Image: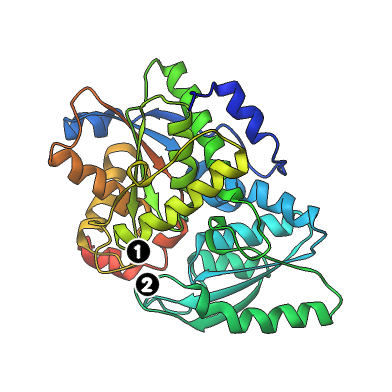
Amino acid sequence: MESLSVSEIIRKIQKFPKKNLIHLPTPLYKLENLSQALGGPDIFIKRDDLTGLALGGNKSRKLEFIIHDVLDKGADVIITWASLQSNWCLQTAAAARKFGITPILILFKTYDLPEEYDGNLLLDFILDADIKIREGPKGGVVKAEDVEEILEEIILDIKEGGHSPYVAPIGGSMVGGSMEKPLGAISYVSAFVEMLEQAEAHGFEMDYVIHASGSGGTQAGLAVAAKALKGGTKVLGISVSDDKETFGKDVLTVAKDTVNALGLDLEINKEDIIVFDEYIGEGYGIINKEVSDTIRFAAKKEGIFLDPVYTGKAMLALFDLIKKGYFKKEDKVVFCHTGGTPALFPNKDKISKFLGL
Ligand SMILES: *Cc1c(COP(=O)(O)O)cnc(C)c1O
């Protein structure tokens, strides 16, 4: 198991063609005020909320590869699913529109948000995506069995209409549907290389990358790249839905598929997938006072907006881990902002209540 050079890993990623959807590199810089206020390690931020497509986020990185795959397979309709206010579904719909592909979104009501045109749902509507709303598991994530039946119906419909569907798995992470390679994770192998080069330009080495983990592709890609390049960076995934055992297994599956797809001589195992499940709160998509306070603290210190479903919980984790002495004072920690800010708006009632507006 030899360590790969950056140029070698770039060559392997380049075997997977992509469409140009976003602006790269996204910025990476130090959060001076936050680092000082917390008195712990140096905190940097990777602004993957600024990818540029449809208000930004990690899903648009993934979609550069996935949209290429859709076109390559001759499909003209993309179907995917997730929760009502899904960032993934919005980004998929926007990416599809840019390339003349029709987006069909199956949106599950997984938490008690009103079914009104706000946040991502409003944006899906503006994109004129074909939106199908269904009941879903409350406080949980949508599972494959929830979609099977409706998916079959839709696929039949599309084919009868003379069109060709591409089924994109939730989050673009786990291999499945029409996606035969872990394209989402591969985009995050690439993102890690981007971060490595930026950190080098800033004159530091990343001890930790911390980010919100949902369908596993982001973490899988980052963890594979970190290990392949042997820089010693640890990737900390903050689960927003499942417990660490269940979720860790999913990430590991995607990570192993990524190693195989890229043809890396690398053994990735359980120990490489570090998941925290202490910051889920009441469940997926459910915001509480701690998360609201964290969002406000980051906004007041740095003028940045986190989101209530993912990045607010990941930042809460970072604050708590610092408090518990998890990091050394001289460590360099990169917080990856994965997007999701449109979800602030449909959560306005809860956020304003918790912040005492
Ligand atoms: C989807 C998402 C994540 C999690 O990424 P995965 O690759 O699904 O684990 C994190 N943050 C935001 C804002 C997201 O939309």
Name the residue carrying label 2: 140
Identify which amino acid the numbered label 1 is placed on.
Ser
Identify which amino acid the numbered label 2 is placed on.
Gly
Q: Quadrant of residue 279?
A: bottom left
In this rendering, position of residue 250 left or right of residue 301: right
Q: Determine the residue located farthest toward the front in the rendered image.
A: 1
User: Is 221 above or below relative to 104?
Assistant: above
Tell me the CA gap for discs 1 and 2: 6 Å
Q: Quadrant of residue 138?
A: bottom left
Q: Quadrant of the C terminus?
A: bottom left
Label 2, secondary structure: give it: loop
Name the residue carrying label 1: 241
Please report the residue visible at 81 percent of the width from the left and 78 percent of the height from the top. 159
In this rendering, position of residue 299 left or right of residue 13: left
- Residue 57 shows up from this direction: no
- Quadrant location of ligand 1? bottom left
Pointer 1 or 2: first along the chain: 2
Q: Position of residue 163 (x, y in %)?
A: 83, 72
Q: Position of residue 51 (x, y in %)?
A: 56, 42
Q: Determine the residue located farthest toward the left in the rendered image.
A: 324
Please report the residue visible at 20 percent of the width from the left and 29 percent of the height from the top. 36
Tags 1 and 2 in contact by the CB under 8 Å rule?
A: yes
Q: Nearer the viewer, residue 6 or 353?
A: 6
Q: Nearer the viewer, residue 48 or 255?
A: 255
Please report the residue visible at 32 percent of the width from the left and 43 percent of the height from the top. 271
In this rendering, position of residue 22 left or right of residue 266: right
Q: Nearer the viewer, residue 181 or 351?
A: 181
Label 1, secondary structure: give it: loop
Q: Position of residue 186 (x, y in %)?
A: 58, 43
